[in-house]
Amino acid sequence: MTELEWGRHYVAVEPTAFRVEYAINPFMDPDDQPDAALAHAQWTEMVRVLRGLGARVDVVGQREDAPDMVYAMNLGLALPGPADDRVVMSHMRYPQRRMETGSAEAWFAGRGWTTSYVGRDGVGPHLEAGDAFAFGGDLVVGHGPRTEELALKTLATDLDVRVRGLRITHPAMYHLDLAFCPLDDRRALVCPAALDDASAAALLDLVPEPLVLSEEEALTTFCANSVVVGRTVVMPACPPRVRARLEEWGFEVVLVEVGEFHKGGGSIRCLTNPLDVRIGRDLTPVAGGEVVLPG
Ligand code: ARG
């Protein structure tokens, strides 16, 4: 197996205004607020661990009016390239998060990234980048609760890649990153319970050696919402069975406590956004693009 080549450069949002102000996923309860100081300390430790593993972590300031902006994975789908660095900005499903995009766009544009949209300001299809992963040369995109199926076609044609759509049906695994985590070129953490039957079968087909998580494992530990740096998996928690398999495969598991962020419905992957997924290396160029949906 070959290590993932991406996962060594992230952007994260420093939590200075993190709150649970509304409920747009089943984890959120405005009566159960995160402790701001503890959340900040947990985030700081996460960044320290990632940097200690050799990853670069850029930091964006949080908007005071955007309590969910800490979940940086959803800022956009970043694809640096030899010709230009491109980022497809998210078009959030819920209006409560839409203002995040303007700040994220300014941040990317200020660093020379070319920004584009599949939809914006409530017009056109929704896309939330926590639904999109490179795996096996293709862009694997979950749709349903957040990203809309219509966005897949635009992504494929705009980026000239093959997009494999998976239908998410589980209300608590509303982003693909809560149910899928690429580990290397052959392996991934996979929770089929997030998907409809045809999509679950398609994902298991796509991953030569899946580490299958139960619905309970995924929901109670957020263990699929992890980040991989080379052969280290940075996880919020890891069921013993999962750890045994990861170690057998030669991965090292590093745990980082980010429980305050679970109150908003996200964990380590949600708090970070990879900036080093490359077309031509991690995604195979396909002229004109192509969308593949489970038959
Ligand atoms: N409260 C946020 C939302 O519902 C959590 C986002 C979690 N992020 C993720 N990539 N899964 O949008």
Image: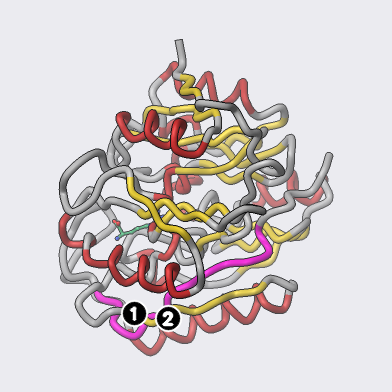
Percent across and percent down for residue 122 are 16, 49
Give the residue number, with chain letter if any, for mark 2.
14
Instruction: Kindly identify the residue that appears in the image at 60 percent across and 34 percent down.
Output: 212
Name the quarter where the C terminus is drawn. top left
Q: Is residue 30 left or right of residue 277?
A: left
Residue 276 at what x, y percent from top left?
Answer: 63, 58
**Most foreground residue, 107 or 274:** 107
Quick one: which residue is furthest to the front in this view? 83
Give the residue type at disc 2: Glu
- Does 18 appear in magenta? yes
For the view shown, which residue lies furthest in the bottom direction?
A: 37
Mark before the other along the chain sequence, 2 or 1: 2
Q: Is the C-beta separation of discs 2 and 1 under 8 Å?
A: yes
Indicate which disc residue 270 carries: none
Amino acid of disc 1: Gln
Position of the N terminus, as image quadrant, is top right
Circle 1 sits in a helix, a strand or a loop, which is it? loop
Magenta-colored span: 7-19
- Local crowd at mark 1 within 10 Å, few (<14), some, or many (≥20)? many
